[in-house]
Amino acid sequence: MNMSNSRFASKIRNYSRPRNPFNGQPIVTPGRTAGSQGRGKVSSINPNQLIKRAIQRDEVEFVPGWSFDQTSLHARLKKALHQKGYTSPTEIQEKTIGTLIQGRDLLGVAKTGTGKTAAYLIPVIHRLLSEDRPFQSLILVPTRELALQVEGEFNSLTKGMGFAAACFVGGKSISNDFRKLRMMNHLVVGTPGRLIDLMNRGALRLNSFTLLVIDEFDRMLDMGFIQDVNRIVAAVQDRKQTLLFSATLDKTQRKMIDELLTNPVEVNINCDDISGDHIDQDIIRVGSTEDKFAVLLQLLQQEGFTRVLLFADTKRMVERMGKQLQRSGIRTEVIHGDKSQFMREKALNNFKKGQVQVLVATDVAARGLDISDVTHVINYQLPRDYESYVHRIGRTGRAGKEGKAFTFVN
């Protein structure tokens, strides 16, 4: 939408329309009044912070100093990288791969979509191919979707090499997990809840794992996994190397970082550029007696709203929004923590392929997922804090493309 000359844009901060703008009929809003945050949730955000025009930056393009073919990586790994079209490293990869092959602990900070997963998988695979004795790696991630992405990337890079990976997440068959654990897995990736469950059942023992990676470290602690993380870390008692990767660096987590890592190398790529300043941001004010859902419908009818990520605070609200949008003729999928893994994967794939216009989600989709070409992010309610807001809107405006974000407020 061209906000400078759109007739709709002139009403965007103070909109009142009690009827469906398409059929003129009254609509019962499927949620609470505008700005409602749900029971027990109060946002600390000043809405005026969310009105920003995108700042065009002259970004310096990263020019790698070497290609994968020029390295001493194992020949089979270089062939696999070439087959996937990976010719040169990203910045985070160039600055970490050599260090990780040497066995150093590492704290790596870089934005989502910059190649962090391959940054730690490439050294792992090189060592598996080069060393005489096999070893096991544990990758700890906060969400099911990210776990599946890591497993898929490992399997893709090791096709035909004889290495096995296992993914353990909620929503999958526990009996299948038991079967996987009876085999040798060179790489295990999982979410804290399912890993703890398997440990409690005596099916998963981590004392043989020598490498630990905690991906999206900052979010892992922010989501309340700290006790589970501590227990899992303690179980990997014979580890020789620990890696922490994240999109942001929270100073309050510094003490735990120092306890986890020994004489680490720290690599920071664009860690301060998480403000969302490259994204057009605006608010939509809707009074308590006005029809919030009708405003949303009209917004989605604007030109250019082709792939929209719509955030709501609760699973119940996500479900209600999804059903209401579908009844209104908007192709919609929903994703939240109570959805089965099959349904979550189906929803994400349909959204990524452009088969649906809107993906309604809780914060499970706010971070860690690399979804390309999201044209707009809409917050149906104010997020609880500014950091959550920035990570939500960061799903749009990726890879140098334009992005727009709107937030409903009182």
Image (cartoon, grey):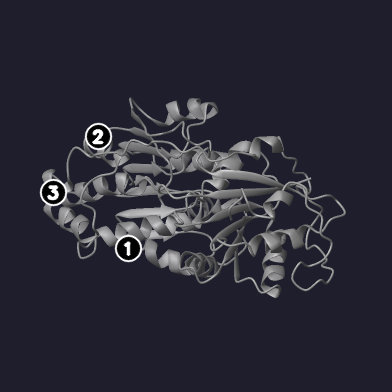
Q: Nearer the viewer, mark 1 or mark 2?
A: 2
Residue at horizontal 63 percent and vertical 51 percent from the top:
5
Q: Nearer the viewer, residue 4 or 26?
A: 4
Looking at the image, is mark 3 or mark 1 nearer the viewer?
A: 3
Instruction: State how far apart marks 3 and 1 are (Cα).
Output: 33 Å
Determine which residue is flagged by label 1.
183
> Do labels 3 and 2 touch, CB within 8 Å?
no
* Residue at figure coordinates x 43%, y 64% from the top left: 178
Identify the residue at image location x=55%, y=61%: 304
Amino acid under label 3? Asp
Three-letter amino acid code at the position of disc 2: Thr
Residue at image mark 2:
99
**In the picture shown, does residue 256 fall above or below 403?**
above
Q: Earlier in the sequence, mark 3 or mark 1?
A: 3
Residue 176 seen by the camera: yes
x, y (%) of residue 99? 24, 34
Image quadrant of residue 96?
A: top left
Crowding at label 2, few (<14), some or many (≥20) Cα neighbours within 10 Å?
some
Viewer-nearest of labels 3 and 2?
Answer: 3
Label at residue 378: none
**Real-space Cα distance between discs 1 and 2?**
30 Å
Residue hosting label 3: 69
Q: How many marks?
A: 3
| Rendered location of residue 391, percent (x, y) | 55, 44
Local crowd size for mark 3, using a 10 Å CA cut-off: few (<14), some (14–19), many (≥20): some
Q: Is residue 14 above or below residue 61?
A: below
- Position of the N terminus, as image quadrant, is bottom right
| Residue lying furthest right | 289
Which of the marked residues, 3 or 2, is nearer the chain's N terminus? 3
